[in-house]
């Protein structure tokens, strides 16, 4: 995380808040504005912010503004819609099928590589494997 980028973003967000209509500014909690004031960069001077061009804003500023919008300006319906959309995105990202789909692909690739890489088995290993097989047969016979 780039702390200086966020400190500069706090400056930009404060600049935007200070240029809002008073009724919108009053919706934002004083505690949040104080947080921004305390954490902002003292060296960064805000210029070239054009609200008609969102590309002039830093990525971090857009993130903070989206949080600000969600917490203070959204209607209850919008909050519910956004929450549902977030939940759906999380479910798709972390669904059971998707989590193990990647693992299955990796296992298939590994099994293909294992099939290609044939390692010669020593006589000692062959003898141990045959003893294991005989013991398994005996155990299966006595389990019945």
Image: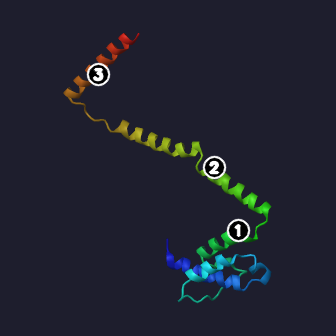
Q: Which residue is painted at 39% across and 12% down in the image? A: 143
Q: Quadrant of the C terminus?
A: top left
Which of marks 2 and 1 precedes in the sequence?
Answer: 1
Secondary element type, mark 1: helix
| Residue 129 spot, x, y in % from top left | 27, 24
Secondary element type, mark 2: helix
Secondary element type, mark 3: helix
Q: Which residue is painted at 25% across and 33% down in the image? A: 120
The answer to whether residue 133 is left or right of residue 92 is left
Mark 1: give few (<14), some (14-19) or many (20+) Cα within 10 Å: some
State yes or no: discs 3 and 2 in contact (Cβ < 8 Å): no
Q: Which residue is mark 2?
A: 91
State yes or no: discs 1 and 2 in contact (Cβ < 8 Å): no
| Residue 116 spot, x, y in % from top left | 35, 38
In the displayed structure, would residue 137 be above or below residue 104?
above
Q: Which residue is mark 3?
A: 132
| Residue 48 spot, x, y in % from top left | 64, 87
Real-space Cα separation, disc 3 to disc 2, in angstroms: 45 Å
Closest to the camera, between mark 1 and mark 2, is 1
Which of marks 1 and 3 precedes in the sequence?
Answer: 1
Q: Residue at the front extreme?
A: 31
* Quarter where residue 77 is shown: bottom right
Q: Which residue is painted at 71% across and 67% down in the image? A: 70
* Label annotation for residue 71: 1
């Amino acid at each position: 995380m780039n702390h200086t980028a966020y400190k500069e973003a706090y400056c930009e967000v404060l600049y935007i808040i200070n240029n809002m209509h008073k009724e919108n500014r009053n919706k934002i909690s004083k505690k949040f504005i104080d947080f921004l004031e305390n954490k902002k960069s003292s060296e960064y001077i805000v210029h070239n912010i054009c609200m008609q061009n969102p590309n002039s804003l830093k990525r971090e500023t857009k993130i903070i503004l989206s949080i600000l919008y969600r917490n203070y300006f959204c209607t209850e319906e919008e909050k519910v819609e956004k929450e549902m959309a977030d939940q759906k995105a999380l479910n798709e990202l972390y669904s059971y099928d998707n989590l193990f789909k990647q693992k299955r692909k990796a296992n298939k690739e590994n099994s293909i590589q294992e099939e290609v890489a044939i390692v010669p088995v020593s006589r000692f290993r062959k003898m141990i494997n045959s003893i294991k097989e005989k013991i398994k047969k005996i155990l299966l016979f006595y389990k019945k």
